[in-house]
Amino acid sequence: MNAYAQGFLAKLRSHATDALDADDLAAWDALLDETQPHAVAHRDDPRVHTTRTTWIARRP
């Protein structure tokens, strides 16, 4: 689960560089850096909750 969470967060981080300031990016990087004690890779509590919505319609 940790590898999935880390990969997902890394993908989000790559898309957030324009929206976040330097402090936020540094915090994000610390979560993704496996050498940091609070990194996602070392946590024992990651959970995944997902939802998908599908819309089906037809013309009258």
Image (cartoon, grey):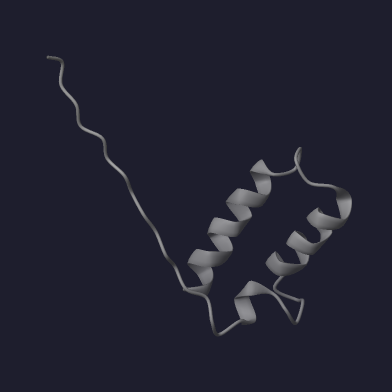
Position in image of residue 59 (x %, y %)? 15, 15
Closest to the observer, 49 or 31: 49
Quadrant in the picture for residue 23: bottom right
Q: Is residue 58 above or below residue 8?
A: above
Farthest top residue in view? 60
Position in image of residue 37 (x %, y %)? 75, 82
Farthest bottom residue in view? 44
Quadrant location, the C terminus: top left
Q: Is residue 3 above or below residue 58?
A: below
Q: Residue at x 48, y 65 (%)?
A: 4
Q: Is residue 21 above or below residue 10?
A: above
Closest to the observer, 57 or 25: 57
Q: Is residue 6 above or below residue 15?
A: below
For the image shown, how many numbered marks are present on the structure? 0
Farthest front residue in view? 60
Position in image of residue 38 (x %, y %)? 72, 79
Position in image of residue 16 (x %, y %)? 69, 44
Left or right of residue 22: residue 46: left
Closest to the observer, 51 or 8: 51
